[in-house]
Image (cartoon, coloured by chain):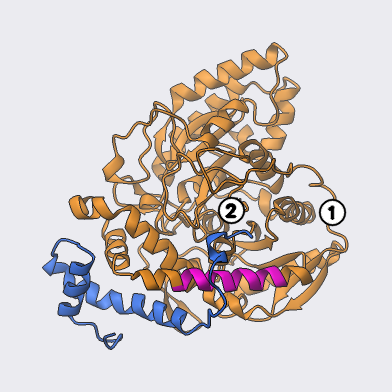
Chain colours: A orange, B blue
Amino acid sequence: MQERDLLSLTVAGAARLIKARKLSPVELAKATLARIERLQPRLGAFITVTAETALRQARKAEKEIVAGDYKGPLHGVPVTLKDLYATKGIRTTAGSRILETHVPKADAPATARLAQAGAVLVGKTNLHEWACGVTTDNPSFGRCHNPWRHAYIPGGSSGGSAAAVAGRLGLASLGSDTGGSIRIPAHMSGIFGHKPTYGLVPRTGVFPESWSFDHAGPMTLTAEDAAIVLAAIAGPDPNDPSCLTGRPANPLRGLKGGIKGLRIGLPKQFYFDDLHPEVDAAVRRAAGVFRGLGARLVEIDIPEAAWGMDCCFVIAWAEAAHYHRDWLRTRPQDYGPDLRDLLEASSTYLASDYLQAQRVRTRIRRAYARLFDKVDLLLSPTGPLPATPHGALDVEVQGRTVSVMESCARFTAIADVTGEPACSLPCGFTADGLPIGLMLHGRVLEDALVLRAAHAYEQATDWHSRLPPLD
Amino acid sequence: MPDEAKMTEAEVATLLAHAELPPAAARRAHLAAGLPGFRQRCARLYAIDVAGVEFDFLRPLR
């Protein structure tokens, strides 16, 4: 197998070839590792490359498949993990100097479930320090670059996972999303990212940013691939009390059922305010594609959306400051300057501030529950801007100066506040060649519907199959 | 509550001491510039009527 053969593969496509014994998991792992070796200096997508583990798992998978013990569509498929997920015997840093030599004694359940499904781990990906930010400019493990434009951020905090998937350095990854950390890098790096319903995927063994808002989920090239990964990692976990206890619906069931008659809400305000004009145009064109596929577009009012960022910020950062309390006092020098500023400032939040934000959260959640009586899905841009240049702390949006973090998470934070499922998928590019993502947001536990609509859009467009200029 | 647009270094020092953070005199001016934004965020949240929202935030998905 040649490295260039990787460029046309998805998880589903590789699985078909592996199952038919037309593609060797060992050859696939070797080609992926060779590509990582070539592109890692350019992308900075990895903190640890797990070549030995990958080859061992690939040989095991190959032996099992040849013996007729095929486990399913992840068997023999190369994947990566955000370096926030515990991996037994493999360093897990959370992108922090504090954990630079930390080697877990056990896998996170999500890690273990991927392994049980036969996936092949090729590496642990770079992230914004402690998953607390959107640039993936990591002070300890280096800057991760956008595969489409080197001088730009890939988004974050799961930026390494997004860069790896976009660069075909592993066909799927697991990221985490607290204010948008799966969907923001998916949008900026031109891939698919799904934030599942809160509690669908266990967070045990995944270093926290905010217990109230943290979600673990898949980052892939397509909605079908995300459904494959989600089916493998979702399900109860006795060690994560926030995890839902019922058996989750299979997100692959009905994936290809189309969207005829679906009611898709287009917000009249907030989500389309202060957008980069090319983002606005791409998402409105995408809305037309959904209409053409038989969906009914419904204009909706959801003024509570404007509260989401403040609500998410106060709760998430208060919880993060609490989690980091001891290290912030004993090892403040081991934090990067941007994160130290945010954690110190967030340490001054009062209990009353936190509780007010939690009560506002309930009002937002009630408003969205009412909204989803009228529509089945909400369609919006994932973010108001495409990727920004590395080093830019502030950007101009329609003549106003806003912080990059504020801008990036403006639309994504809401689904973390409500716990509802939401995905980002490519819907175009700027004239400068930067990807643009759209977001689909659905009812609690209707992850399958979100993925089905995304899959239908992908069948009608080819944005998801474009390749970044790396070859 | 102080005038949120103008936080002094002394006010920052008080807030940090209350949070039991080690003194970081060199950082006070820096944080004095950033902290008002944090208070403004809370002020916007306090302006939202949350009467009748008392228990169910403890169960986010119900």
What is the span of residues highlighted in magenta in the rendered image?
Answer: A356-370
Q: Is residue A471 visible?
A: no
Residue at image location 53% in from the left, 71% down from the top: B54
Residue A314 appears in which quarter of the rendering?
bottom left
Residue sitting nearer the eye, A210 or A246: A246
Compared to A97, does A392 lie above or below?
Answer: below
Residue type highlighted by circle 2: Tyr
Give the residue at mark 2.
A198
Q: In the rendered view of the protein, which quadrant contains the C terminus of chain A?
A: top right
The residue marked by circle 1 belongs to what chain?
A: A
The residue marked by circle 2 belongs to what chain?
A: A
Q: Residues within 10 Å of mark 1 (few under 14, many from 20)?
A: some
Furthest residue in direction top, as rendered: A67
Residue at image location 39% in from the left, 52% down from the top: A128
- Disc 1 or 2, which lies upstream in sequence? 2
Compared to A61, does A212 lie above or below?
Answer: below
Residue type highlighted by circle 1: Gly
Q: SS at mark 2?
A: loop
Q: Position of residue A228 (x, y in %)?
A: 68, 39
Q: Position of residue A205 (x, y in %)?
A: 45, 39
Identify the disc placed on residue A356: none
Residue sitting nearer the eye, A55 or A270: A270
Residue A449 appears in which quarter of the rendering?
bottom right
Give the residue at mark 1.
A258
Report how far apart the C-alphas of labels 1 and 2 lie in the structure: 25 Å
Query: Horizontal placement of A166 versus A439: left or right?
Result: left
Q: Is residue A363 magenta?
A: yes
Query: Horizontal placement of A197 versus B57: left or right?
Result: right
